[in-house]
Amino acid sequence: MKELIRMENVTKRYPGVIALKDVSVSFKKGEIHAIIGENGAGKSTLMKVLSGAVSPSSGLIIVDGKEYRRLLPKEAIDLGIQVVYQELNQIGNMSVMDNVFIGMPPRKGILVDKKEMERRTREILHSIGMDVISPFEAVERLTSGYQQMVEIAKALTRKVRILVLDEPTSALSSAEADILFSVVEKLKREGVTVLFISHRLEEIFRIADRVTVMRDGEVIATRDIRAITRSEMINMMVGRSFTEVYPRSGAAVGEIVLEVKNISGAGFKNVSFSLRQGEILGFGGLVGSGRTETIMGIFGATHINSGEVCIHGKKHVMKNPSDSIRRGMALLPENRKEQGLILSLPIRNNIDLPSLKRISKWLVINKKKDNELVEESIAQLSIKTPSANQVVINLSGGNQQKVVVAKWLGAESDILIFDEPTKGIDVASKKEIYELMCDLARDGKAIILISSDMEELIGVSDRLEIFYEGTISGEIHSYEEFDRNRIMEYASGITGAAEGKNE
């Protein structure tokens, strides 16, 4: 394949930090090229240099033989470089076609040509096999997978030669990811170069032609995907011998601490399950299957219309999350940045927030108790930070997740609900989170794990409840019985709820 772009000795310095160090890498026309590495490895900075969002301190970008010291955003677009970021840049209450052509709608004179906008939107959606999406549908009403397709359609409104996809499957179900992969492969056949950033190694082996591994701002290696193993890839990323094994807690399972009996509410119906001390109970299912909606009802964030929730054998009605927190329940939400943390505050304030009553007297915080709580939490969870006063937004995704855990451990919670805990986290940080969950289980905590990652769900859970259309369609009672095909049958509604619950 012909070389399309080459980056030579690209370096990017920030005050006190070298984000990229003498990076040299090339991308070929019509290839799917994966860029992998831990959080902070330099992947996103490299892509921002390529797209013109960041100016390199030194180095060259060579496109079609022409050298550039830097690219301006408009130059990058004119050269056919488009980026679809992990956090989608969309206006939810606007239509698909308005989002696709945002900022550059077709016009008749000074007026926006709505008919032409609709025609071109349909044409682009058809080109990626997405005729099912209506140009008039509000984006906020689409599934995560279809929202991702709208973002790709937006990129295709201009002639694309290089399409950068940054963690494109992080919020997608396996079925939605399959659709995305088919679109990516179609673009490849049409000669588009796709740069694919992902922490999910199984996706890299499934779709990539070549892979570039980065660590600490440097390129460690670029390999043909057929010439590298999973273990080699991981060892290159972390810089040491590393085996990606899902740990098993081996915890002694105790008494039932949470029992849910036939609860129904918005997005879930007739859900029943129990959770025991020392157990990691996995919630599987496709995106929108009702897992998170069920948990929100149990946690008091939404209303339960019928059924019972019992904690330690006593029936409770959770009017709001504060009720749940007082009874020892904690929720680590999927969107930790918006729902689990106050990013503008230091680690200290995030950790002690749920424990203020316990470490205060007459509305005055006991500094000694506060310091003990925060320092013990940082040490216990190995949070990588120069101090407890570091602002949370400056931490990596894995360390942010640890801060969320720390605040609930400080609140002495004994029922912990992890909703997509490793979303957007690198492989080494994932293992730390898994080991932490196992340690918590061994300490007698009861854990619910909600995950769309099949490997993660199977690897960490002791028992599984699989959701389909708002109810539990199947239960798998032990690790030894876990089977991918069986899980997918339950998740897809192929096997009925009665069969799953009565084995």
Image (tube, rainbow, N blue to C red):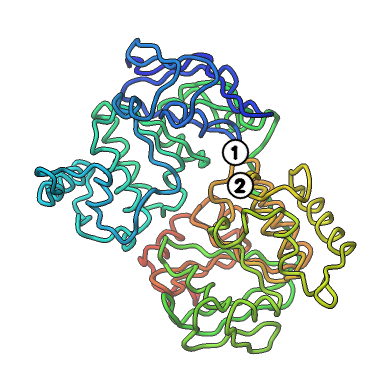
- Residue occupying the point 78% across, 52% down: 378
Where is residue 419, by image quadrant? Answer: bottom right
Specify whether 221 is left or right of 368: left
The secondary structure type at the circle numbered 2 is helix
Q: From the image, which quarter does the N terminus lie in? A: top left
Q: Position of residue 152 (x, y in %)?
A: 31, 42
- Callout 2 touching callout 1 (CB < 8 Å): yes
Residue at the extreme right of the image, as rendered: 368
- Residue occupying the point 77% across, 48% down: 382
Residue sitting nearer the eye, 436 or 133:
133
Q: Where is residue 485 in the image (x, y as percent from the top left)?
A: 43, 56
Q: Residues within 10 Å of mark 1 (few under 14, many from 20)?
A: many
Q: Residues within 10 Å of mark 2 (few under 14, many from 20)?
A: many
For badge 1, the amino acid type reads Asn
Residue sitting nearer the eye, 343 or 207:
343
Give the label on residue 397, or none. 2
The residue that mark 1 highlights is 39
Looking at the image, is mark 2 or mark 1 earlier in the sequence?
1
- Residue occupying the point 54% across, 47% down: 424
The secondary structure type at the circle numbered 1 is loop
Residue sitting nearer the eye, 398 or 186:
398
Q: Is residue 39 above or below residue 448?
A: above
Measured in 3D between alpha carbons, the distance from the residue under mark 2 to the one under mark 1, in whole angstroms, is 7 Å
Q: Where is residue 266 in the image (x, y as percent from the top left)?
A: 42, 78
For badge 2, the amino acid type reads Gly
